[in-house]
Amino acid sequence: MTYSNRLKVEPFRPSYLSSLSSSPIVAFTVYVLLSLLCVTMTESSKASAFSAKADTSYVSAPASDAANQVANPVKFPRDLYPEIDSYEDGYLDVGDGHKIYYDVSGNPDGIPAVFLHGGPGGGTSPRVRRFFDPKKYKIVVFDQRGAGKSIPNACDDLEGSLVGQNTPKLVSDIDALRKHLGIDKWGVVLGGSWGVTLALAYAEEYPKHVDALLLRGVFLFGPDEVYYLFSSGGTYGQNPQAWENYCRYIEDTSDDWAREKTNFLGAYWNRLTSSDKSTRESAAAAFVGYELSISKTYIDPAVIEEYLGTPSLLIPFAVMEVHYMINAGFLLRGQLLDNVSKLAHMKVEICHGRGDYVCQPQAAWRLTKALRKAGCKSVNCQFVSGAGHSDTEPGLVDAMVRASDKLANELSTQ
């Protein structure tokens, strides 16, 4: 599928979704939660410290952190820019019953930059503005369909949040927002994880509307990437407990394990869309707990407690992510790499954690080589030692801010 009007894609929506009652769930992003203070715990003390409402029965214990690196991280040359407020915000009606929330900050006359959050099903926070120099950038942040402050939210209407919930629609939303704000073209599109997928899809559909890409934690939505993370046990090599617990939840709740063990994503989807609230919550806890337990170099148990103990933060992230995974990201197989020649004129900065177990470093290298072969003369791939997947990792923050500054300097001299 290319992002034209020739193919209309509708999301996978089982008939039983219409029977779901509204759930008190709000999509939010993992970056804010991953900035909480760390308390180093053993397996037993970790379990006792979690609040009673947090279902941690299928969450593996974090690796040891005797140096308390989460509370006292290694210092890098660059950190986030200071906090800033937005000077404009609002809602944009993008059709299908959706209104996406956005805000604008920084320099009104600066280089237009847009931040694409991860998930799918995550949302933004004021923190993400701080990857950009507010004196040089006009910073646009928005919540994708069904996420954050956008309406409808899975908090109020799960079925409604899935209407028109697919990649071509999200791509169209980005350009609708650009037009709404009177921006000729984006100077920089910054995307992380799923946001990389969306950034590439957007740039390939609207190549004349993008000057540069800043990508963190590359995810190309290749079948091997999805299979590695959610189906084949690819993460077992470095995170055996996490993978076994991800599988054990399905086994313990299955009445047909022989069938369901061949389709973990389908099994999770059936539970996440169950008419039973407790089933939805326990499935989300197991699914998201698996990702949280492999997402950072140093895992904060307090984050897992907060995230899994709050259904309003938990369920939409799981629902949206599985929705896109079982539908192959609403992309043709290999689409993003096949169309990479459309990006040859752009400046591309890639930052990827060497220890990223969610999105493997090979995806970043695969993209880098494809861009170079396509004739992209300004592509830089930086693998960051001691960093995992999250954009709260100090090494990734340093790399992303330096890349953002570099692009601002280059674009301002064009």
Image (spheres, helix red, strand yellow):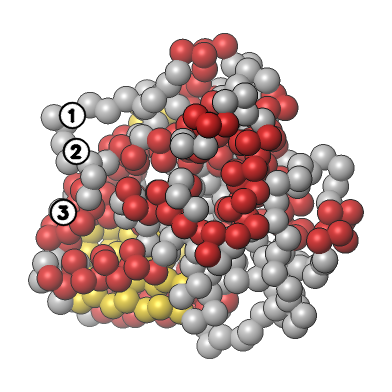
Which element is circle 1 on? Answer: loop
**Upstream in sequence: badge 3 or badge 1:** 1
User: Quadrant location of residue 107?
Assistant: bottom left
Residue 1 marker:
2
C-alpha span from label 2 to label 3? 11 Å
- Under circle 2, the secondary element is loop
Residue 248: percent from left, percent from top: 64, 43
The quadrant of the rendering that contains the N terminus is top left
Q: Quadrant of residue 348?
A: bottom left
Residue 63's image quarter? Answer: bottom right
Secondary structure type for disc 3: helix
Give how far apart the Cα atoms at labels 2 and 1 are.
7 Å
How packed mark 1 is, by other alpha carbons closer than 10 Å (few <14, some 14-19, many 20 or more), is: few
Residue positioned 43% across, 60% down in the render: 359
Which one is nearer the viewer's eye here, 37 or 385?
A: 385
- Looking at marks 2 and 3 on the same chain, the residue that comes earlier in the sequence is marked by 2
Type of amino acid at the residue the image marks with label 3:
Asp
Q: Position of residue 201 (x, y in %)?
A: 26, 49
Q: What residue type is labelled 1?
A: Leu
Q: Distance between the residues labelled 3 and 1?
A: 18 Å
Residue 64 appears left or right of 23: right
From the image, state whether disc 3 or disc 1 is nearer to you. Answer: 3
Please rate how many residues cluster around mark 2, counting C-alpha atoms within 10 Å: few if below 14, some from 14 to 19, many from 20. Answer: some
Which residue bears the numbered disc 1?
Answer: 7
Look at mark 3 in the image and give the residue it sits on. Answer: 338
Residue type, mark 2 in image: Met
Q: Is residue 211 visible?
A: yes
- The x and y percentages for residue 355 are 50, 72
Mark 2 vs 1: CB contact within 8 A: yes
Q: Quadrant of the C terminus?
A: bottom left
